[in-house]
Image (spheres, grey):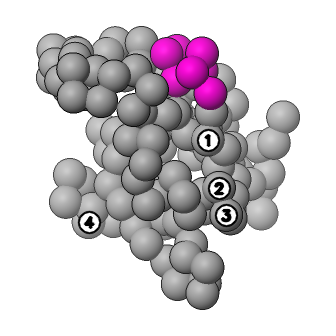
Amino acid sequence: MTTDGGTLQRLGAGKYLLLTTYKRDGSTVPTPVWVVPDGNALGVWTTADSWKVKRIRNRADVLVAPCDVRGNRRGDDVPGSAEVLGAEATGHYRTLLARKYGLLGRLTLLGSRLRRGREGTVAIRIVLQGDAG
């Protein structure tokens, strides 16, 4: 399957993304997350010790779809590959999140930094299948 730039733009422009990861037994776990576009990829920010991070480290393939805040799917799943990023890239994604989500984003980032420190969160880069590069 090849995705077009419109799919990437549509998913990146949405307020929430349903990120579906896989457990070791193959069952899926969908989670609504904030999303930012980043070139030919999508960016997600989450706590470093979250289960979704552990699942992605074990199995990089994911599904993504537009959704609402409660995780109600608003479109079709699109396959992709996810990668947990280091501190520098996570800082870049924090900047993108603050820009996209405005005051709420900045307050959320500040609260997280006060609770967990900068090392307590990580960025996840998602490349849609057919868009590798």
State yes or no: discs 2 and 3 in contact (Cβ < 8 Å). yes
- Mark 1 — residue? 84
Which one is earlier in the sequence, the residue at label 4 or at label 1? 4
**Magenta-span inclusion, residue 90:** yes
Q: CA distance from mark 2 to mark 3?
A: 4 Å
Q: What residue span does the magenta drawing correspond to? A: 86-92
Mark 4 against mark 1, which lies toward the viewer? 1
- Mark 4 — residue? 72
Q: Quadrant of the C terminus?
A: top right
Residue type highlighted by circle 3: Asn
Residue at image point 21% right, 20% down: 114
Query: What element does badge 2 sit on?
Result: helix
**Rendering quarter of residue 102:** top left
Q: Is residue 131 above or below residue 59?
A: above
Residue 57's tag is: 2
Query: What element does badge 3 sit on?
Result: helix
Which one is earlier in the sequence, the residue at label 4 or at label 2? 2
Query: What element does badge 1 sit on?
Result: strand
State yes or no: discs 4 and 1 in contact (Cβ < 8 Å). no
Q: CA distance from mark 3 to mark 4?
A: 26 Å
* Mark 3 nearby-residue class (10 Å; few <14, some 14–19, many ≥20): few
Which one is earlier in the sequence, the residue at label 1 or at label 2? 2
